[in-house]
Image (tube, grey):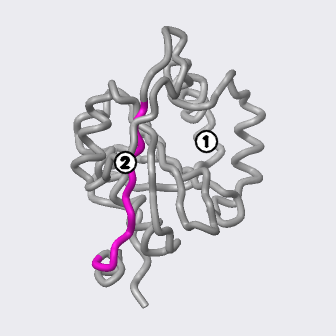
């Protein structure tokens, strides 16, 4: 059996949310600019996030989701990466990532997604990861392309931003035989 994937590199580590992360989580969850990329319709309270941290097992099979804080080697939180909408029958899950502006363009998103993929494919046995990406988000499209995701569909007028509807594309990565053989 292959050794479980490590959740760190020289510059970042992925870790479960701690109670001390509530302010960081509030920053992301309550950023109205990010709401248009999700299903959020309002802010989260400190109480809701405390309850989430206390009750969540950070077990994809029990919770249907995983959230990781992306901690930079400096000790600062650089972002959050999530696995959600887990479908156990079909072994697929959606992923999402957000990186703070001051940590962008440093390879952190790439490293975090690579760590997450290895964890999901190797340890959790997920067959497929996918993401919905706005077609006007060139940096994100570039990132997922570099990581070997295939763009399988464009959904017209999929999300409403307050300024009109936007198209999104579906990026998919399917675990292949070589990744299984290599312990990925």
Q: Where, quadrant-wise, is the N terminus in this rendering?
A: bottom left
Query: Mark 1 against mark 2, which lies toward the viewer?
Result: 2
31 is within the stretch colored magenta? no
Q: Nearer the viewer, residue 109 or 129?
A: 129
Residue 59 pos. (x, y %): 64, 63
- Mark closer to the chain start, 1 or 2: 1
Residue sitting farthest toward the top: 163
Tell me which residue sits at (40%, 83%) in the image: 3
Tell me which residue sits at (28%, 78%) in the image: 178
Distance CA(mark 1)–CA(mark 2): 39 Å
User: Which range of residues does the magenta coloring cover?
Assistant: 168-178
Assign a secondary structure to mark 1: helix
171 is within the stretch colored magenta? yes
Pointer 2: what residue? 152
Tally of marks:
2
Question: On the picture, is 24 further left or further right than 72?
Answer: right
Residue 154 pos. (x, y %): 40, 36
The reply to whether residue 76 is visible in this rendering is no
Q: Where, quadrant-wise, is the C terminus in this rendering?
A: bottom left
Give the number of the disc on residue 63.
none
Assign a secondary structure to mark 2: strand
Question: On the picture, is 35 further left or further right than 146?
Answer: right
Pointer 1: what residue? 20
Residue 160 pos. (x, y %): 54, 19
Q: Residues within 10 Å of mark 1 (few under 14, many from 20)?
A: few
């Amino acid at each position: 059996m292959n050794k479980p994937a490590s959740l760190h590199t020289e510059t970042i580590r992925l870790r479960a949310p701690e109670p001390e992360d509530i302010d960081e989580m509030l920053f992301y969850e309550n950023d109205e600019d990010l709401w248009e990329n999700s299903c959020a319709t309002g802010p989260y309270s400190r109480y809701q996030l405390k309850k989430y941290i206390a009750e969540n097992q950070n077990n994809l099979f029990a919770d249907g989701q995983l959230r990781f804080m992306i901690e930079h080697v400096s000790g600062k939180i650089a972002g959050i990466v999530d696995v959600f909408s887990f479908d156990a029958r079909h072994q697929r899950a959606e992923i999402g990532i957000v990186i703070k502006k001051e940590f962008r363009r440093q390879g952190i998103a790439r490293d975090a997604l690579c760590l997450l993929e290895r964890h999901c494919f190797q340890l959790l046995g997920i067959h497929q990861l996918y993401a919905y990406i706005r077609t006007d988000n060139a940096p994100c499209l570039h990132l997922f392309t570099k990581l070997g995701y295939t763009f399988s569909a464009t959904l017209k007028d999929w999300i409403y931003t307050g300024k009109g509807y936007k198209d999104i594309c579906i990026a998919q990565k399917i675990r292949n035989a070589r990744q299984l053989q290599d312990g990925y």
